[in-house]
Image: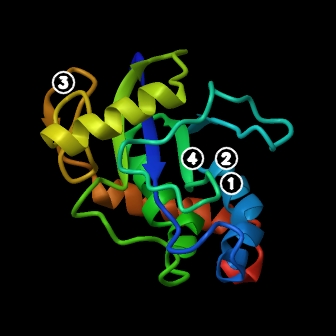
Amino acid sequence: MSEHWLALYTFAQFRTRAHDPVNDEFFSSEAAIWAAMERADGFIARAGYEDEAGTEIWGEQVFPKYWTDNGDGFAPSTISLWQDLESALAAVYRGAHAEIMRLGPLFESNTAEYPPYVLWWVPKEHQPDWDEAVERLELLGDDGPTADAFTFKAAFSPSRKPVTVDTDRSRAIAEHNRLRADLPKSVQ
């Protein structure tokens, strides 16, 4: 058993202001998506938001240098902790979260200018805050994947050695998550 947890920070920007009706499906699906993520194999914890009851806030939410405020002071971003790379990959890219990403062109497509997410290992019981997460995303954007800030495609182990994500195991985890999910049909 590892003495580390995998931290995951995601960052995106809406093409329009957050409360534009084009983003309604994103917001109406958010609670179900988080519920599915929280039930997913390998999930440890996630940061809450100031307007969200019942979930701990992990410091003041800040955004990376890539953020462009479109007048509403908002950008979809998350911090979560996972047991391993495969569980995180299954939940983010093969589960309900992947479905919300397929809603259409809600987000800016500036991934050539900045990474949409970053991974890094933290000691168990360490809870990264928004400042730490933003620092890791910017490190990845500035230096590319390193043991301190990496991606699923260029991953590292807790011992700082390059590793390959076991995609077969990730698919199996995703299938297990899907079978036990209790999601609305709109996000299945």
**Amino acid type at image mark 3:** Arg
Q: CA distance from mark 3 to mark 4?
A: 24 Å
Residue 38 tag number: 2
Residue at mark 4: 41
Question: Could you tell me which secondary element the residue under label 1 belongs to?
Answer: helix
* Mark 4 in CB contact with mark 1 (< 8 angstroms): no
**Amino acid type at image mark 1:** Trp
Residue 67 point in image, percent of width and height: 43, 51
Looking at the picture, does residue 13 appear above or below residue 187? Answer: above
Residue at mark 3: 160
* Mark 2 in CB contact with mark 1 (< 8 angstroms): yes
**Residue at 28% across / 54% down in the picture?**
114
Residue 130 point in image, percent of width and height: 52, 31
Question: Could you tell me which secondary element the residue under label 3 belongs to?
Answer: loop
Looking at the picture, does residue 16 appear above or below residue 78? Answer: below
**Tag in front: 2 or 1:** 1
**Residue at 70% across / 38% down in the picture?**
48
Q: CA distance from mark 2 to mark 4?
A: 8 Å
Q: Earlier in the sequence, mark 2 or mark 3?
A: 2
Residue at mark 1: 34
**Tag in front: 4 or 1:** 1
Residue 173 appears in the picture as rendered: no
Which quadrant of the view contains residue 96? bottom right
* In the foreground, 36 or 181: 36
Determine crowd level at label 3: few under 14, some 14-19, many 20+ residues with C-alpha closer than 10 A: few
Q: CA distance from mark 2 to mark 3?
A: 27 Å
Determine crowd level at label 1: few under 14, some 14-19, many 20+ residues with C-alpha closer than 10 A: some
